[in-house]
């Protein structure tokens, strides 16, 4: 798979990357920015992620309403990750599996240890994490993109505090 092209407006980045990003912003200037309001069907962690993520993406200038599905997928997978983690906190990573054994002579039953079983939530976490990484890359939420956003927030104090949003605040 070829390496994805970097999008950036950082003046310290390579000129070809800045030109490519500016061209994308110019070519898509007629497209609507992603809506700030969260879709009604998102709930809990997904809704909180939407409200934190969309202002960051709007500030980038190149994430548009057409990318809504990708952003929704990101938020939903974030919720799956968090719900899976909640399950592991509650039920543990593994659970004891036992089987009921009947004594053939006496007819008595007792529980016998049959081993341990992995919590299915750990597989959900694995899958959601992989999808989040892929979607974050598509949306420009990589460390280099965050560094560019932090640079932008330092230059303009009237914009939302992006540093605080990236730290997740108390809702996450």
Image: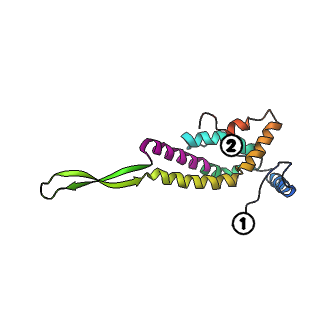
Name the quarter where the C terminus is drawn: top right
User: Which quadrant of the view contains residue 170?
Assistant: top right
Q: Secondary structure at mark 1?
A: loop
The residues colored magenta run 74-92
Q: Residue at x 53, y 44 (%)?
A: 82
x and y percentages locating residue 165 in the rendered image: 68, 38
Q: Secondary structure at mark 2?
A: helix
x and y percentages locating residue 74 in the rendered image: 61, 50
**Res. 32 in view:** no
x and y percentages locating residue 143 in the rendered image: 71, 49
Q: Residue at x 12, y 54 (%)?
A: 106
Lower position in the chain sequence, tag 2 or tag 1: 1
Q: Residue at x 59, y 55 (%)?
A: 130
Q: Residue at x 64, y 54 (%)?
A: 135
What residue did someone put label 2 on? 54
What residue did someone put label 1 on? 2
- Distance in Å between CA atoms under marks 2 and 1: 28 Å
x and y percentages locating residue 61 in the rendered image: 77, 47
């Amino acid at each position: 798979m070829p390496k994805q092209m970097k999008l950036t407006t950082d003046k310290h980045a390579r000129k070809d990357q800045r030109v490519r990003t500016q061209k994308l912003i110019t070519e898509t200037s007629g497209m609507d920015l992603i809506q700030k309001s969260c879709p009604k069907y998102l709930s809990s962690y997904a809704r909180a992620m939407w409200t934190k993520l969309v202002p960051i993406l709007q500030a980038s200038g190149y994430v548009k309403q057409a990318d809504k599905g990708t952003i929704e997928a990101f938020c939903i997978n974030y919720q799956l990750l968090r719900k899976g983690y909640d399950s592991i906190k509650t039920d543990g990573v593994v659970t004891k599996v036992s089987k009921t054994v009947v004594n053939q002579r006496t007819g008595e039953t007792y529980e016998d240890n049959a081993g341990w079983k992995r919590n299915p939530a750990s597989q959900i976490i694995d899958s959601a994490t992989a999808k989040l990484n892929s979607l974050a890359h598509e949306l420009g939420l990589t460390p280099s993109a965050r560094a560019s956003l932090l640079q932008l927030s330092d230059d303009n104090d009237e914009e939302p505090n992006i540093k605080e949003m990236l730290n997740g605040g108390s809702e996450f």
